[in-house]
Amino acid sequence: MKTLLYLLLFNISAISFAQDPQLFENDWYLYEVMSTDEGTLYDVSLISPSITPYLRISEDLTYSGEGACNTFSGTYEFFPPNDLSSISFIATTNDCGIQQHNWFEYDYFGFISNGFWFSITQDNGGKVLSMSSPLMGYAIFKSYPLSTSDFQKNKFQLYPNPAKDKMFLSATNPTENLKVKIFNIEGKLLSSQTLALEKQTSIDVSNLSSGMYFLNIEDENGNTVVKKFIKN
């Protein structure tokens, strides 16, 4: 009888600790993930084209989220005081069309679908969820998404789209020293140039084969905006 009562009290204590609202009251936006298996560090702010991966954990320990282009869901099991272990995981399997995005998802999903210990701290912007595993690496999430700079709020327009030989880039605000790079859908850099944008400027695409491409626009502070275009 005493043993049964002890187990009951232990389970109630574990459940109440697992349901700490700090873990469940937010969507957690991924800032950084490191894969021990591959030895690769992903800084989400540097991934191009930009993505917004996140994780959402419910009080019943079911979880869901998004990587680069695929979604996932599953269920965690809680082990006091601060360990989570995934007992189920399922994800969509779409090809993101960009190799860097595919590589990122492989490592990110591999981390999320395993076990780790977690801690929640505070920074100037909100809460920080840190996860770590000796076998899988670590991940840093925050309760707020990556900030958007004034540069990224600038309205860049790319036309005509689809383009044949030439297309034009325009913006609401003049910007000096722009690095303009063209990538194919596999993430390979095809061309790069630096230009000053006042109202609009032309970009030669006559040497590109027909298909889909990404125009990476970067200022001197490293802020980036990515535009997709099609070459006829």
Image: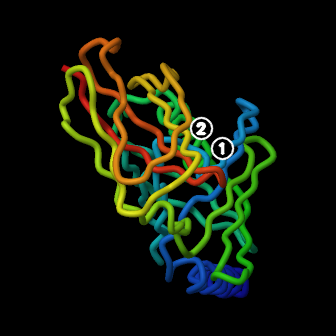
- How many tags in the picture? 2
Q: Nearer the viewer, residue 208 or 95?
A: 208
State the quadrant of the C terminus. Answer: top left
Q: Describe residue 81's horizontal placement relative to residue 77 as left or right.
A: right
Q: Which residue is mark 1?
A: 42
Q: Is residue 199 above or below residue 216?
A: below
Residue at x 71% of width, y 41% of height? 41
x and y percentages locating residue 63 in the rendered image: 45, 62
Query: Would you identify the image quadrant in which residue 95 lies?
Result: top left
At numbered mark 2, what does the secondary structure look like: helix, strand or loop?
helix
Q: Which residue is mark 2?
A: 107
The amino acid type, in three-letter code, at marker 1 is Tyr
Q: Earlier in the sequence, mark 2 or mark 1?
A: 1
Q: Which mark is residue 180?
A: none
State the quadrant of the N terminus. Answer: bottom right
Residue at x 43% of width, y 55% of height? 74
x and y percentages locating residue 140 in the rendered image: 68, 60
At numbered mark 1, what does the secondary structure look like: helix, strand or loop?
strand
Crowdedness near tag 1: few (<14), some (14–19) or many (≥20) residues, C-alpha within 10 Å: some
Residue at x 48% of width, y 26% of height? 187
Q: Nearer the viewer, residue 85 or 34?
A: 34
Residue most extreme to the front: 198
Q: Describe residue 34's horizontal placement relative to residue 45 as left or right.
A: right
x and y percentages locating residue 96 in the rendered image: 37, 34
Point out the frontmost of discs 2 and 1: 1
Residue at x 35% of width, y 24% of height? 204
The amino acid type, in three-letter code, at marker 2 is Asp
Query: Would you identify the image quadrant in which residue 158 lies?
Result: top left
Q: Tell me, yes or no, whether the two marked residues, 2 and 1, touch with CB atoms within 8 Å.
A: yes
